Image (cartoon, rainbow, N blue to C red):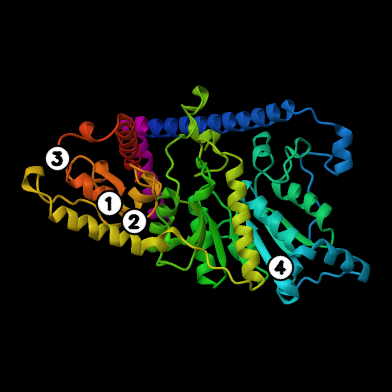
Amino acid sequence: MDQRIGAYLDRLSRAFADTRVQLATTAIAASAITAGVMWGARRTRRTKRARDLKRSTLEMVDFDSDLLSDSGLSGANHALPNEVVTKHTPVELTPNEESLIREQLARHYAFLGAEGMAELRDSFVVVVGAGGVGSWAAMMLLRSGVQRIRIIDFDQVTLSSLNRHVAATRATVGIPKVDALKMSFMDIAPHAKVDARVALFGAETASDLLSGDPDYVLDCIDNMETKLELLDYCNKHSIRVISAMGAGMKSDPSRVQIADISDTFEDPMSRAVRRKLKLMGIHDGIEVVYSSEKPGKVQLMSLAESQQDEPGDFSVLPDFRVRIVPVLGTMPAMFGIAMGTHVLTRLAGFPTEPLAIKGRHALYARMQRELGNREKDMSAAFGGPQLQMNTDDCAYMLEEIWRGKSAISGAIDKLTLLRWRRELPMTTANCVCMTKAEADRHSKLAGSLEDNYSSDIIEFVERRLNEEKHISTMR
């Protein structure tokens, strides 16, 4: 044994005596040291930037120390007292307190009935994500009678939260969003059991954060991978869940919908979630709140010049979005209130049946058939039949581009789709909506469009078709 060890050490000594080996070893060591220094420097810069950003944010706000003290927020690391809440956590009320609560919820008792309210008040709800959507959903559930609620979020209130967060004030800037919500909750329903968790949801924490036998989980997460982990967990464990899609870059309140994920359309985030869920074996059964409004009017905010070299340094967490999504503050509130309304009616057993836009699928299919029949009659002089649109394209043109109205008269009944310029193929870039009578006349026009329509109508149609060309790049 000693001889073998001696022989090995002798060979090793001769190897390191070789100049080439020495150079290679030196190069490897130098590279490792350089990488370590660069990594350390980068981490130091990131920490300094984060610290400077937080300091500058706090300096922008003129905090009243007495106000903070009165609010119980005397320190950046302050955490409100918390208790673990489950479905079975007792809620104890004196007769006088119960009388106050019954008066507070009188309108809901009149609407949902005593039995429905008993179910609602006995429920336990978990809201994951306490931002613009989740804060409003949680607030309305609490105001409606939910007495056991867990809210989960890792983030803090910032100045930009004030345009959309239900409980954000200047006095709460810098404290956890869940604590800001809990403080507000205690002013409204001091008897409620609120489990405020300053935590980041993930697959490894799901079993703990979604424990306690919840009746409903509200997914208000804006990170795609984390959202998918939550939906997958709820699906596997048969937990009722409703998920919020993207409220950013949306502005049309009439397009907010509640539907099964399989029935969503014209929403990029819904499409991405739907496709990824299918890869996980989930094809339907996930309720979502989404907007059928096509984004494109506004874009993601550009990075500052100082952020462009190392954009990852400015992400809140690894794999989280760096660029900021423009948000009209009312839209997250609408999403959250829609979620809250849907959940409370489900919990109370009150009959509702959300009408998804795809409930008009029969209409779209009919329009596509009629379009095909018109194309069959298209003469060779205009290229003959050239239909390049499916049922979803017909839905898109009717709802998104023509807003369910005739381009000629603005009528909303007996609509059909057809070519605008007969010499061009039947595609979404050449598709106009008219009433059937208008379409019949259009198909028999003699002369050019300019000879038959006013300049206002022609300009309107061309403007909408140019809009379609822009939107179609994002479909």
- What residue sits 75% from the left and 39% below the top? 169
User: Viewer-nearest of labels 2 and 1?
Assistant: 1
Amino acid type at image mark 1: Ala
> Which residue matches tag 2?
414
Instruction: Give the quarter of the image for residue 56.
Output: top right
What is the distance, in whole Å, between disc 4 and disc 3 at their CAs?
A: 58 Å
Residue 2 belongs to magenta span: yes
Tell me: residue 251, above or below residue 291. Answer: above
Marks 1 and 3, the one that precedes in the sequence: 3
Instruction: Look at the numbered disc 1 and give the secondary structure of its residue.
Output: helix
> Which residue matches tag 1?
437
Amino acid type at image mark 4: Phe
> Disc count in the image?
4
Amino acid type at image mark 3: Glu
Residue 345 belongs to magenta span: no
Q: Are marks 2 and 1 in contact (CB under 8 Å)?
A: yes
Marks 3 and 2, the one that precedes in the sequence: 2
> Percent x, y for residue 329?
61, 40
What is the distance, in whole Å, between disc 1 and disc 4 at their CAs?
A: 46 Å
Q: Is residue 277 visible?
A: no
Instruction: Look at the numbered disc 4 and give the secondary structure of its residue.
Output: helix
Magenta stretch? Answer: 1-24
Left or right: where 320 falls relative to 165: left
Q: Are marks 3 and 2 in contact (CB under 8 Å)?
A: no
Q: Are marks 1 and 3 in contact (CB under 8 Å)?
A: no
